[in-house]
Amino acid sequence: MCFSATASFSAAAVTAVIGVASLRKVSVGRQIPLACIPLVFGVQQAIEGAHWLLLGRWPQDTAVIFLLTNAFVALALVVWPLLMPVAVGLVEPLPSRRRVIFALLAAGLPAAIYMSVDAADHPFTCTIVQNSLSYTNYRPFPLLVVAAYFASVGTPLLISSQRALRAFGVIATIGLAISALVRWYSFVSVWCFFSTLASAFVYLQLAQDAEHRNAATRILQSVGSGAAIVRRLRAWLG
C-alpha cells in the first residue's frame, strides 16, 4: 500500500476486525469463502507494512524480504482469480448468475496457473517508488492473461444480484482504473489497497443475510405458535 508502515498496519488491523466480524455472521458453510476475503486483504496489508519497515534497512536479497514479496504476489495474482468467483458464486441466489460467475473460473484458473509458474521461474522484487511499493519481475504479462485475471477477479462482484457485493465491485473497479492511470508503477499494491477498503461490503452483505434469516425464523416461529394455538382451540372445542 502507499504512504507508510503505519497506514499499512492500520489497514491490516481494520480488515482483520472486519474479517472476524464477517466470520461471526456466517451461518452456512458456503458463506465462509466470502467471509475470508477481508482476512486475506488484511494479510496482504500486514505484508506491506513489514515491507515498509524492512526495505532500505535490509538488503533486497534477504530471505525474509524475498518471502514477503512473493507471498504478497501469490495472494494478489494467484489466490484472487480463484477465490473471488468461488466466494461470490457460492452466495449468489439466482441460478443464472451463479452459473455465469462460476464459469469465470475458466478464465481465473489459467491466469492463476500462468502467473504462478511465471513467478516461480522469475521471482518478484519489491521496491519503494514515489511513496508506493512496486512489485515486478520485469516480465510484463501477456494481454490475454491480464484480461483473464481481471475478468475473474472483478466481474463476479459486478454481476452479483446482491447490492453490497456490487458496491464492492464498483469501488474495486474504480480503484483499478485509478491505479492503472495514476500509479501504474505500483499498480498491484495500490489496487489491493482500494479493494481492502471495499471489503467492508462483505460484512454488510453477510449482516444483511443474517438479518433476513432471523426475520424468516421469527415469521416461522410466529406461524408455528399460531398453528399450535389453533390446534389447542380445536381440541378444547371438540
Image (cartoon, rainbow, N blue to C red):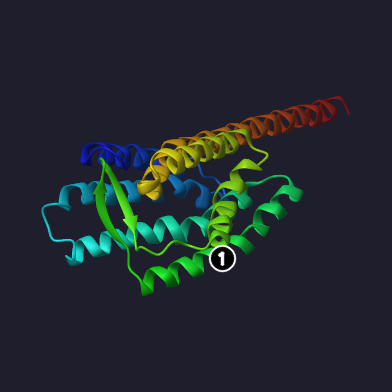
**Residue occupying image coordinates x 72% and y 33%:** 224
- Left or right, 139 with reference to 59: right
**Residue occupying image coordinates x 26% and y 64%:** 67
- Point out the image quarter for the C terminus: top right
Of helix, strand and loop, which one carries label 1? helix
- Where is 206 relative to 154, above or below? above
Hey, which residue is sitting farthest right in the picture? 238
| The one of 192 and 101 positioned closer to us in this rendering | 192
- Where is 233 relative to 26, above or below? above
Give residue 221's position: percent from left, percent from top: 67, 32
- Where is 40 relative to 166, above or below? below
- Left or right, 122 with reference to 230: left
Mark 1 belongs to which amino acid? Leu
Give residue 49's position: percent from left, percent from top: 24, 46
Q: Which residue is mark 1?
A: 109
Give residue 48's position: percent from left, percent from top: 28, 49
**Residue occupying image coordinates x 32% and y 46%:** 45
Give residue 236's position: percent from left, percent from top: 82, 26
Residue 205 sits in quarter: top right
| The one of 171 and 178 positioned closer to us in this rendering | 178
